[in-house]
Image (spheres, helix red, strand yellow):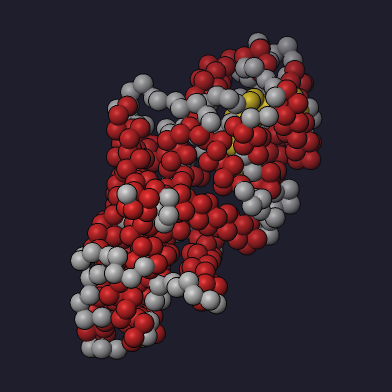
């Protein structure tokens, strides 16, 4: 019963959805300010979601109905599970299970996989193009991401439980305080950009080029689920980074404010990278992620093994 | 007013459909989205696929070739949705009236909800038209 409550309401679906909507508003507002605009009103992402839920769902005749409609739900379920695990570990002690770090890393892949499956199922050539690009991008960003996630694990002597990582950072100082931590954080922020498919890695969507790519055939409720999954990823992934590299969050007294600032720092950093870069081609992205970024990641792991 | 309709008026995603225009109206539409006018203040966003759209911005003369395509794009748009005809050509062909390649106007092919005249209409004019349309939708509900 407690698990159902945690998964559906707090800190699972409902909480993450509202936090994600808030994060999405911050994203759009900061983007607007960077472009010297006023930007959307506070409730704009919520209006978007409600509107999409109220619209007709068009299903293309040629597509595989079942896969097409179900794959967005899998993405949503996966990101909810990640958020639940990460928040339960941060809010209460000893709630994790052995190896939950590995589970989280795997679950973070599922929204992309769900989108790929949905894109191929819609039988639209543009969506297929987007799906194949997303697949290449996923192959490219998983390698440096996993290598960089190894740095906190190495520093805390092989802890693969999230609350062990937090406990280590409470006693020994945060991971980002060391040279290897800083290098790993740079790698992780770049790969986060790719995982959220934001500019410069928005190659699978590329609105000006392939018209939204993967989600081109989606409308109505499934589109609302996809958008909501994106917003929740925008909340969950930076929170996971805060946990891994910056000692998690705590809710005692003034540290609430500090915890929120940590998250907003990551979010605004991601938004600023998104707004000041052009889109890469897919071959450039793979070369970049498997070349310099992976190299920095390996260097960070070696430094961590040397204890720096 | 229902919550669905309220959300629709607060977040109108537009798809931009040219049916043989001279590109002037299209440039003015894009001007609406620039920082100077910033339609995102009202939740209006330009989308790339008619499946995501709530409003079709139709410009141009509706040539014979584009009639079929315009109908198809309209059917691809999930309902409820509105059609906005922009520019004199879309209203009554303007200087091209009587031409043999454009037997019908936009409103004979698609159910147009509001007309915005001008050759091309100013961005202020387009914004005023959309605001009037939203007020009309709110009044009817």
Residue A143 image offset from top left, x and y in percent: 25, 64
**Residue drawn at 32 percent across, 38 percent down:** A71
Instruction: Give the image location of residue A68, x and y in percent.
Output: 33, 32
- Where residue A255 appears, as percent x and y from the top left, is 51, 76
> Which residue occupies the foreground of this view, B75 or B81?
B81
Q: Residue furthest front?
A: A1
Does A46 appear above or below A198? above
Q: Nearer the viewer, residue A298 or A77?
A: A77
Q: Is residue A130 above or below residue A66?
A: below
User: Closest to the observer: A259 or B114?
Assistant: A259
> Could you tell whether A156 is left or right of B116 in the image?
left
Above-or-below relation of A35 to B119: below
Residue A2, horizontal then vertical, whole percent = 33, 53
Whether A178 is drawn above or below A38: the answer is: below
- Whether residue A110 is visible to the viewer of this picture, yes or no, is yes
Quarter of the view holding residue A276: bottom right
Which residue sits at x=33%, y=60%? A85
Would you say B78 lies left or right of A189 here? Answer: right
Looking at the rendering, in which quadrant would you find the C terminus of chain A? Answer: bottom left
> Residue at position x 78%, y 36% from top?
B128
Q: Residue at x 33, y 70 (%)?
A: A93
Closer to us: A128 or A162: A162
Does the image show residue A296? no
């Amino acid at each position: 019963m407690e698990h159902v409550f945690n998964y559906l309401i707090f800190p699972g679906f409902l909480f993450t959805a509202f936090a994600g909507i808030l994060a999405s508003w911050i994203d759009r507002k900061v983007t607007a300010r960077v472009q010297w605009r006023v930007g959307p009103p506070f409730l704009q992402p919520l209006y978007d979601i409600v509107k999409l839920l109220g619209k007709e769902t068009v299903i293309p005749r040629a597509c595989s109905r079942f896969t097409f409609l179900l794959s967005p739900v899998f993405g949503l379920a996966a990101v909810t599970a990640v958020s639940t695990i990460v928040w339960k570990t941060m809010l209460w002690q000893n709630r994790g299970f052995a190896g939950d770090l590995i589970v989280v890393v795997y679950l973070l892949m599922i929204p992309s996989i769900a989108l790929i499956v949905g894109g191929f199922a819609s039988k639209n050539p543009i969506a297929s193009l987007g799906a194949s690009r997303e697949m290449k991008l996923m192959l490219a960003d998983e390698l440096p991401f996993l290598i960089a996630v190894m740095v906190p694990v190495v520093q805390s002597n092989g802890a693969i439980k999230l609350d062990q990582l937090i406990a280590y950072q409470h006693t020994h100082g945060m991971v980002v305080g060391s040279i290897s931590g800083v290098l790993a954080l740079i790698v992780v922020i770049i790969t986060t950009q790719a995982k959220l498919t934001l500019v410069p890695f928005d190659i699978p969507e590329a609105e000006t080029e392939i018209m939204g790519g993967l989600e081109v055939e989606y409308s109505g409720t499934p589109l609302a689920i996809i958008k909501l999954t994106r917003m929740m990823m925008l909340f969950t992934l930076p929170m996971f980074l805060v946990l891994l590299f910056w000692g998690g969050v705590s809710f005692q007294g003034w540290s609430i404010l500090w915890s929120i600032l940590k998250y907003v720092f990551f979010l605004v950093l991601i938004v600023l990278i998104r707004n000041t870069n052009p889109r890469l081609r897919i071959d450039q992205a793979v070369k970049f992620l498997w070349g310099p970024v992976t190299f920095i990641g390996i260097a960070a792991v070696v430094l961590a093994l040397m204890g720096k | 007013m229902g919550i669905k309709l309220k959300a629709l008026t607060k977040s109108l995603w537009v798809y931009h459909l040219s049916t043989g225009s001279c590109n002037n109206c299209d440039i003015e539409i894009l001007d609406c989205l620039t920082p100077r006018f910033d339609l995102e203040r009202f939740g209006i966003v330009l989308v790339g696929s008619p499946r995501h759209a709530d409003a079709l911005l139709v410009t141009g003369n509706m040539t014979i070739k584009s009639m079929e395509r315009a109908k198809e794009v309209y059917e691809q748009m999930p309902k409820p949705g509105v059609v906005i005809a922009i520019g004199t050509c879309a209203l009554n062909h303007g200087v091209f009236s009587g031409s043999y390649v454009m037997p019908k106007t936009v409103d004979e092919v698609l159910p147009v909800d509001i007309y915005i005249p001008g050759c091309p209409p100013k961005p202020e004019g387009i914004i005023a038209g959309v605001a009037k349309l939203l007020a009309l939708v709110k009044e009817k509900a």
